Each structure stands twice: as structure tokens, then as C-alpha cells.
Amino acid sequence: DAGVIQSPRHEVTEMGQEVTLRCKPISGHNSLFWYRQTMMRGLELLIYFNNNVPIDDSGMPEDRFSAKMPNASFSTLKIQPSEPRDSAVYFCASSSGGDSRYFGPGTRLTVT
Amino acid sequence: KNEVEQSPQNLTAQEGEFITINCSYSVGISALHWLQQHPGGGIVSLFMLSSGKKKHGRLIATINIQEKHSSLHITASHPRDSAVYICAPGGGADGLTFGKGTHLIIQP
């Protein structure tokens, strides 16, 4: 099993640009989570899906952030427009039936 | 919102020592996760537990749901155990709330 796959692994973009982060969960997992990690705030939940349906998006910072899960094998997290304070590592994780979380390698985003 | 307190924040120990990391939280939950984040940044789930104790190799995790407290123990610590250990209360398919982590360094 390839584990959770995230792309890109690194993204550097200028303020105001649109950024799209991608995640492929482990096959058969029915829950998908997006997290953000910064030095100041640590790990935070942004949004999570069960069976492709968004369950809790209260952690999404503002309307500039949006997430979709069009099918069981793919999810995107979009930031438009991006700002320097969005610089962080974004992790995607998946799980099956509320079991342990499997984390992807993360996407390191730098907004200049 | 669940307030999560981990202690200690930083810990440096010698190889072979017994390590204990504590986690307290404010809101009752059905389960709790312990995560390990390697120096390279990758995150691995060590345990998910809802009662009692779990053991995996040299790692032991305990939880007391009534007292809202969990501990992670490392026996016969080794330099490769150096990492950040993060406590995350939250059960089932919940999104999890995270502690700020314990930075552990094991010196040879």
C-alpha cells in the first residue's frame, strides 16, 4: 500500500495566487482529514470528510479556504487568494471506521 | 473546545532511561491518539486507545477516561526515539484536538 499521497510536496507562491493541494487517501478508508501545522499554533484540524461528505469545517480559517472530495480517492484543499500567513505544512490523513489516522507526508506551502 | 496540556514540553534524557510523557484534557472523549513526528516532519500514529493500556514494543500508552489523563512511556529509550510526541484526544471519526507536543531528545 502506498499510504496517503499528497502533492505537491513543496509549493512556493506569491501572495494573491491560487494554491491547490491534493490528497489521495488509502484505498478503502472512508474518513479524510485536512490539518495545518505552524510553529505558532501547532497542528490544527481544518476540515474532515466521512464518506466524501464534509462533516466539520469549523477549522477552515476563512472563506479563502475551500475543500472538496469529489470521490473516495481524491480530495483538494484550495486557497484563493493566498496570503503569507497561510505559510504552513498541510497534512492530509485518512482512517477507516474511526480507527487510527494515517498521515500523508505533508505539503510545505510558502507564500511570499 | 478541548484544552490539551502536555508535559513536559521538552525532555532530554540519556539512552536507556525510562521516559514518561503526560497528557491532560478538559473535555471527555471516547478515545485518544498518540502521534510521533520525526525530525523530517512525517507523522506516525502510535496508539489509539479508549481505556486501560496498550503496548507496542518499547512503547506503552495508558489512559484514564474518568480523570481525563493519558501517559506515554518509553522503556529502554534509544536515540532513534528522538522526536516530537503529540497527544490528540478525539474518538471515532472525530477531527481531533492536538497538544503542543513534547520534544524528546535521547542522547547516546
Image (cartoon, coloured by chain):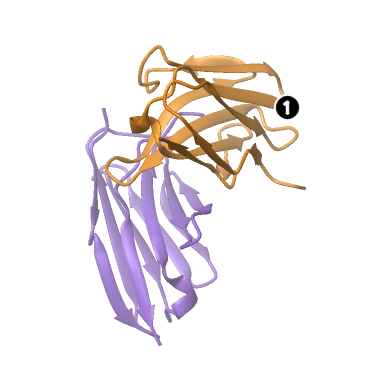
In this image, B11 relative to A31: left or right?
left
Q: Is residue B20 above or below residue A69?
A: below
Number of callouts: 1
- Quarter of the picture holding the N terminus of chain B: top left
Q: Specify the amino acid type for callout 1.
A: Ser
Identify which residue is drawn at 40% across, 41% down.
Answer: A37
Identify which residue is drawn at 49% across, 75% down.
Answer: B80
Q: Is residue A37 above or below residue A30?
A: below
Identify which residue is drawn at 45% across, 71% down.
Answer: B81
Which of the pair A3/A111 is nearer the observer?
Answer: A111
Where residue B50 sits in the image (x, y, percent)? 43, 44
Q: Chain A shown in which color? A: orange
Where residue A11 sits in the image (x, y, percent)? 55, 38
- Quarter of the picture holding the C terminus of chain B: bottom left
Where residue A76 sits in the image (x, y, percent)? 60, 23
Identify which residue is drawn at 24% across, 59% down.
Answer: B9
Chain coloured purple: B
In this image, B1 relative to A17: left or right?
left
Q: Is residue A73 above or below residue B80?
A: above
Which of the pair B27/B43 is nearer the observer?
Answer: B43
Which of the pair A106/A73 is nearer the observer?
Answer: A106
The chain that hosts pointer 1 is: A
Where residue A100 sits in the image (x, y, percent)? 56, 43
Residue B92 visible somewhere in the drawing: no
Q: Residues within 10 Å of mark 1 (few under 14, many from 20)?
A: some
Which residue does the numbered mark 1 point to in the structure image?
A73
